[in-house]
Amino acid sequence: MPVFEFYPQIKWVHIACVLASGSLFALRGLLVQLGHAGAAQWEPVRWLSYAIDTSLLTAALMLVSILPGALFANGWLTTKLVLLVVYVVLATLALKRARTRRARLAFFIAALACYVYMLGVARMHHPLGWLHGWIA
């Protein structure tokens, strides 16, 4: 049975994990902003985040392994990978590394914007994401 046969199911798991991961980050970020950082860093919540993100990464790697030539053949996928690194850094700063409340808020907003831009890049299959067609 060819592996490509499972592509739709793997893609569905990947998309579900993207939405779950982003929603959990938004919830945790809101908790931090409301002064409940302890709840945002509660061990079961962190482990849930790790489980979702591990599943997300596993599904992404499975998709890339099914279509290995797609990784760098498409500028949108490379853009998404770069944005993922930026998002992780911003999210870490927003949840626990930034020193001031104002900085945590700025990093939280920037991380959410990066997440939405990544969604646009993935949805449009273009490095400009949601801006594709407006700018180019």
Image: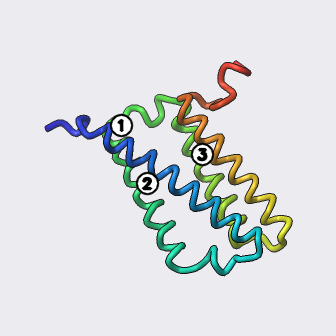
Of residues 48 and 122, which is closer to you in this image?
48
Quadrant in the rendering for residue 7: top left
Q: Tell me, yes or no, whether the two marked residues, 3 and 1, touch with CB atoms within 8 Å.
A: no
Q: Which mark is residue 68?
A: 1
Q: Mark 2 points at which residue?
A: 57
Q: Tell me, yes or no, whether the two marked residues, 3 and 2, touch with CB atoms within 8 Å.
A: no
Q: What residue type is labelled 2?
A: Leu
Quadrant in the rendering for residue 66: top left
Q: Name the residue under label 3.
A: 82
**Alpha-carbon span between mark 1 and mark 2:** 15 Å
Secondary structure under the numbered disc 3 in the rendered image? helix
**Residue 22, percent across and down?**
58, 54
Q: Tell me, yes or no, whether the two marked residues, 1 and 2, touch with CB atoms within 8 Å.
A: no
How crowded is the residue under tag 2: few (<14 C-alpha within 10 Å), some, or many (20+)?
Answer: some
Q: Which amino acid does label 1 sit on?
A: Pro
Q: In this view, does 123 lie to the left or right of 4?
A: right
